[in-house]
Image: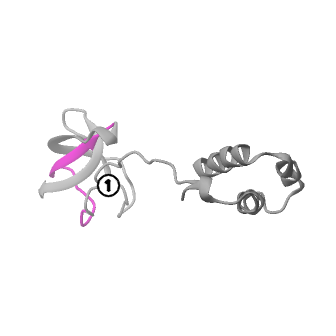
């Protein structure tokens, strides 16, 4: 939308709609067209959706809780780096049967991470 093509009244209406008719709008009737355009662009920047950093690839749901002795693939913190390790489960740290982000396990070498895939059951 090219703001310079809009009329002054339309620019004021955009500001008024954004402020939901509050008394704060009264000062905008004194502004010139260029100042109104500047205010509307500020509003557009604030209202526009924020840029979201790309999320890590979430692991596919693993069926069932891992058991001690299973050979697994885990993702290690920080999760957004996607650093994975394979190993044998020493301890299962998550008590729930199903976990949305993957069960937290400790491998025999001491590495702690979230379960991505069970490679081989015991």
Circle 1 sits in a helix, a strand or a loop, which is it?
A: loop
Residue nearer the viewer, 77 or 94: 77
Q: Is residue 57 above or below residue 113?
A: below
**Colour mapping used in the image:** one colour
Q: Report x, y in % for residue 4.
A: 61, 52
- Magenta: main secondary structure equals loop
- Identify the residue at the far top of this view: 109
Q: Residues within 10 Å of mark 1 (few under 14, many from 20)?
A: many
Is residue 69 visible in the rendered image? The answer is no
Q: Quadrant of residue 121?
A: bottom left
Quarter assignment of residue 120: bottom left
Instruction: Name the spot of residue 68 as percent of width and height, x first.
Output: 21, 50
Horizontal placement of 100 versus 10: left or right? left
Front residue of 41 and 23: 41
Q: Is residue 40 magenta?
A: no
- Residue at 40% in and 45% down: 53
84 displayed left or right of 78:
left
Where's the C terminus, which quadrant? bottom left
Q: Residue at x 23, y 46 (%)?
A: 74
The residue at which mark 1 appears reads as: 102
> In the image, what residue occupies the spot 54% across and 59% down?
1
Asked if residue 113 can be seen in this view, the reply is: yes
**What range is drawn magenta here?**
62-77
Q: Position of residue 52 (x, y in %)?
A: 44, 48
Q: Position of residue 3 (x, y in %)?
A: 60, 54
């Amino acid at each position: 939308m090219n703001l310079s093509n809009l009329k002054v009244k339309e620019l004021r209406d955009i500001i008024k709609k954004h402020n939901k008719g509050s008394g704060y709008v009264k000062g905008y009737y004194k502004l010139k067209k260029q100042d109104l355009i500047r205010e509307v662009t500020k509003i557009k920047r604030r209202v526009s959706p924020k840029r979201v950093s790309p999320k890590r690839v979430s692991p596919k749901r693993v069926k069932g809780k891992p058991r001690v002795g299973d050979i697994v693939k885990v993702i290690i913190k920080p999760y957004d780096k996607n650093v994975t390790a394979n190993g044998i489960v020493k301890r299962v740290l998550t008590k729930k049967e199903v976990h949305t982000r993957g069960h937290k396990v400790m491998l025999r070498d001491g590495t702690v991470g979230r379960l991505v895939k069970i490679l081989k059951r015991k």
